[in-house]
Image (cartoon, helix red, strand yellow):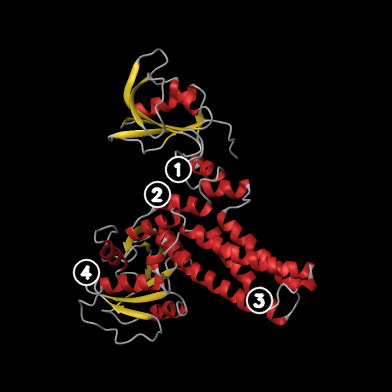
Amino acid sequence: MTRKNETIAAISTALGEGAIAIVRISGPDAVFVARKILTRQDFPEPSRMYLTYLHDDDGSIIDRVLCVYFAKPKSYTGEDIIEIHTHGGIMSAKKCLELLLANGARIAHAGEFTRRAFENGRIDLTQAEGVLSVITSRSNEALKAAARTLTGELSREVMKIHDEVLELQGHIEIEIDFPEGETLNGLNIPERIRAIIAHIEELIPRCSAGMLLNSGVRAVIAGRPNAGKSSLLNALLGRKRAIVTDIPGTTRDIIEETIIIRGVPVKLTDTAGLRESDDVIEAEGVRLALEAVNGSDICVYVADGSAELSAEDSEYIRSLEGRSAIIAVNKSDLPQKISSIESSLQKIYLSAKTGEGINELKTAIYDMAVKDCVLSSGLNVSAMQLEELKSALSALREAEQSAVSSLGEDVTAGLLNSARISLLNVLGVDAGDELLDSMFSRFCVGK
C-alpha cells in the first residue's frame, strides 16, 4: 500500500554505461527536495529543461546535469515531478538517488509512479497495462497492440459498452419503480442486449490477441531418444543451443529458448527422450518432459522418419489426439521408413539437419497459436481483465435469456448490473489495494 503524501524517487533507466541516466522524483515535496541537491534554485516554466549541477552535502560538484520540472496535475503521476538527467553510468545516478533519499524522499516501490498516475486519474487500469506492455513488448506487433491500449482504445470500447448497459439497466429499473409509466413501451430488451453482446464478442478476441502477442505460447518439443529433438530446437533457433550427439539420453534437463514467429513469442522447450530408464537422472528428465508436455500450449512430437515407428511412438501420439499438437517427422534427408502415421494430428516432414520443412513447421506453430485471433487489432489486457470481460459477457447472455423468458425485470436488471460491475473492474474503478498491489508489482522500480 502506498502513501500519496510521501515524495518518492527512483532511477528510471537501466544502470550501466550510456549517454544519460534519469532519476525521477514525484510527490508534494519534489521541488523542495530537488533544490537541496542542485546548484540552480529557480525552476523555469514547466516542461522546460535547464542545465545545472548536482552537488554533494558539502557543496562539491558531482555531475553536470539536465533538469526538467513537470507541474501537477499535468504530469505523468498527476503530482509534481522532477527529472534529473545525469551522465550515464552507475555512480552518478546512484549518488543522485542517495542524495534525494537523504533529503526527504523515499525509494519508490515497483510500479509506484504508474500506480500514482492511476490513482490520480491520469490513466485507467487498461492504460496501465498498456504501459507495462510497451516495456515488455518483444515484437513490432506487440508494441502496436500496447500502443493502442496505452492511448485509450480499449478504455473507450469498454466505457461505450458500460454506458450501453447502464442506459438499458436504467430503463428497466424505472419501469420496475414506475410500472404505470410504460418506460419500456416499444423497447425490445432482448434485441438491445444482443447488440451489446455482439459488441463485447468482438472485443474479447482482440484482447486475446493482445495477450498472445505479449505473453506468447509454450511449445514443447517431445519424442523418443535420438529422434532429433535437440537438432530441431537448434534449427528453429537458427543457432546451436542444445548439445547434439548420437548417444541416446544426451538431453536430460529442460532447455528453454524463445523465438518470435511473425510477432508471436514462442517459448520452445527441448525435453529428454521419452523412454523407460533405470538411470535415476534420466528418469527424472523423462518425468520433467512429460510434465512439460502436459503443461504446454502446443506439443511438437518428433518422430524419426528414417526408422520404423515404434509402439512407444504410436502410444505417445495417440495420447496427443484432441490436443494442440503437431507431428514433426524428422530426418527427411535420409531414406524414409515411415510410410504413414495413423493420426488426425497435422504432420510435417522435415530435416533439422538441412532445414527442409522448418519454415513450414514455424507456420504451423503460428497458425495453431493464433487460431481465430486478429493480431492486427490486438489490445493488451491482463488475465484478470480478460476474465472480467468474459464475466460481463456471461452475465449479458443470462440477461438476454431472462428477458426472453420473462423471468422478471428485476432479474434482468440485476444481471445487467453484474455485467456493468465487471466492465468497471476492467478499468480498475473501485479497485482494492490487493488488486492494485498485484497489478503494479509486475512493473520495474522507477516506472
Q: Which residue is mark 3?
A: 189
Residue positioned most to the front: 181
Q: Position of residue 329 (x, y in %)?
A: 30, 77
Q: Amino acid at mark 4?
A: Lys
* 77 lies above or below 274: above
Spatial CA span between label 3 and label 1? 47 Å
Q: Position of residue 202 (x, y in %)?
A: 49, 71
Asked if residue 412 lies left or right of residue 94, the reply is right
Query: Nearer the N terminus, badge 3 or badge 1?
Result: 3
x 36%, y 39%: residue: 14
Q: Is residue 7 visible?
A: yes
Viewer-nearest residue: 439 or 50: 50
Spatial CA span between label 4 and label 1? 41 Å
Q: Is residue 275 visible?
A: no
Viewer-nearest residue: 183 or 139: 183
Task: Please say if the residues under marks 3 and 4 sit with CB atoms less than 8 Å apart.
Answer: no
Spatial CA span between label 3 and label 2? 43 Å
Query: Nearer the N terminus, badge 1 or badge 2?
Result: 2
Q: Which residue is mark 1?
A: 444
Query: Nearer the N terminus, badge 3 or badge 4?
Result: 3
Q: Residues within 10 Å of mark 3 (few under 14, many from 20)?
A: some
Q: Nearer the viewer, mark 4 or mark 1?
A: 1
For label 2, the SS is helix
x 34%, y 62%: residue: 263
Spatial CA span between label 3 and label 4? 63 Å
Asked if residue 235 lies left or right of residue 43, the reply is left
* 112 lies above or below 266: above
Q: Which residue is mark 4?
A: 353
Q: Residues within 10 Å of mark 4 (few under 14, many from 20)?
A: some
For label 4, the SS is loop
Q: Which residue is mark 2?
A: 135
Asked if residue 190 lies left or right of residue 290, the reply is right
